[in-house]
Image (tube, grey):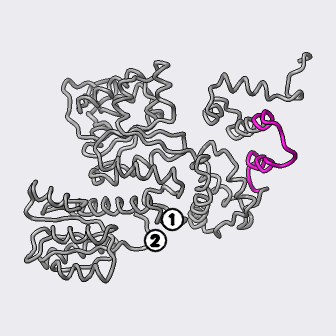
Amino acid sequence: MTSTRKHRILVVDDAPTALDILERNLSSRGYLVFTASNVADAVRILEGSPMDLVITDYKMPKISGLDLIRHIRENYHETEVIMITGYASVKGAVEAVKMGAEEYLAKPFTDEELFAAVQRALNKRELRTIVKGRKPRIAPNSYGMIGESSTVRNMLAQIEKAASSPATVLVLGESGTGKELVARAIHYSSKRAAAPFVPVNCGAIPEKLLESELFGYVKGAFTGANESRAGFFQTADGGTIFLDEINEMSPAMQVKLLRVLQDKQVCMVGARKTQKIDVRIVASSNKDLQSLIHKDLFREDLFFRLNVVSITVPPLRNRQEDIPLLVSHFGAKFARELGKPEPVFPDETMRIFMNYAWPGNVRELENLVQRLIIMAEGKTVNIPDLPSVMRFSALSGAGPFRSLAEEEAGYIRRILASVGGNKSRAAEILGIDRKTLREKIKQARTPEDKPSGNR
């Protein structure tokens, strides 16, 4: 977890040995750890120093851990709580959660279980802080998502809600917006955080191999299958599988995935028996799935199975106020990696960034900043240092006023230029179909553009 300061954790336990072990383990992970052997001492520490997280034992003499949780919830709303106990019971877990504990750990627990619970609790606190707008400027959250716009804050709030539920999640958004970051945020702030997160790019695996890659195969299932091999679903057992570009999956594979969602079982290629799996599915698409449904390219029943919780990642052009934050962050990051001075972006350069359409979204911005730092002669990035397609946007707004049709034509030309003439991508950005775009391009042609009869 990346942070500008050490997280402060208070550990409360009446057993000296347990207190010492928890302090030593948490300190080894870089946390600033305070300890108390009883609730009264814990309350005094809280009064004198704010804590990000309190880890408290359940059974303690005189005043119990539940009473401490109640005190924290009434007086320290920003502090998260983890309850640990050697007397595990459903009743105790219910009481702890009712009082406001984020996590409930039964002794004995492993170091991995402890660290995962701490990470989840701190992630929830950080997400809550971001949503409330208390995050310092130009500071990335723990998932690599940067922004203070209302669209980003709303998305982070949706992530927090999705993480607290076991439901299947569908993440929608254009290429380069950060859909995998959203999937990782959901996984690592959920109760599955200690288990594997397995990303699968459905568009990058040949259709003939996708089934065996997802579900595995047994020895002799096909030519070259010299041994049995687990698939991505088995690898992700207990955790989360991220099916990126689900829209690229063939209709035949969609049927098999639908069966997995319904039965919670997978069948390895060449096997006769199915295997029970415990996997959360997060899927993503950079295309409009409902449009694909109308064209019989995507199954409607699968869409409804996947679309239990839906999160849309906004394109960069819809969150322009976040662009300076992103530019500053990537500038500092790559300058540090390349051993160069942090770049300076004058107002006129930043104005071009703000006016540009960013068809590749955050990924395009990140790659551009990296390229500018590598190629720059000095630390100041001026307009001549920018790609020609971006320098063209510097002309927007210059000169006399133009008609609405002329403005539209100019905007369409800039979008087409920014995507290298790719009409499908330009139509997607403009929110129109290719036929409409062709008509508008035809209308937008100047006499010089139009072919002559001699050609």
Q: Is residue 398 above or below residue 119?
A: above
Q: Where is residue 231? Give x, y as percent.
A: 31, 36
Q: Residue at x 78, y 33 (%)?
A: 405
Identify the residue at image location x=20%, y=28%.
274
The number of numbered badges drawn on the structure is: 2
Mark 2 falls on what kind of element? loop
> Considering the numbered disc 1 on the image, is that residue within a helix, a strand or a loop?
loop
Which residue carries the number 1 mark?
Answer: 139
Q: Quadrant of the C terminus?
A: top right
Magenta region: which residues? 385-409
Q: Is 420 inside the magenta-drawn segment?
A: no
Quarter holding residue 255: top left
Marks 2 & 1, CB-CB < 8 Å contact: yes
Does the magenta run of residues contain 390?
yes
Going by the numbered disc 1, the residue's amino acid type is Ala
Disc marking residue 4: 2
Task: Identify the disc placed on residue 359.
Answer: none
**Residue name at image x 38 percent, y 21 percent:** 252
Q: Main secondary structure of the magenta part?
A: helix
Relative side of 97 to 210, left or right: left
Q: Residues within 10 Å of mark 1 (few under 14, many from 20)?
A: some
Position in image of residue 148 (x %, y %): 53, 58
> Height in image: 154 above or below 34?
above
Dot 2 or dot 1: first in sequence order is 2
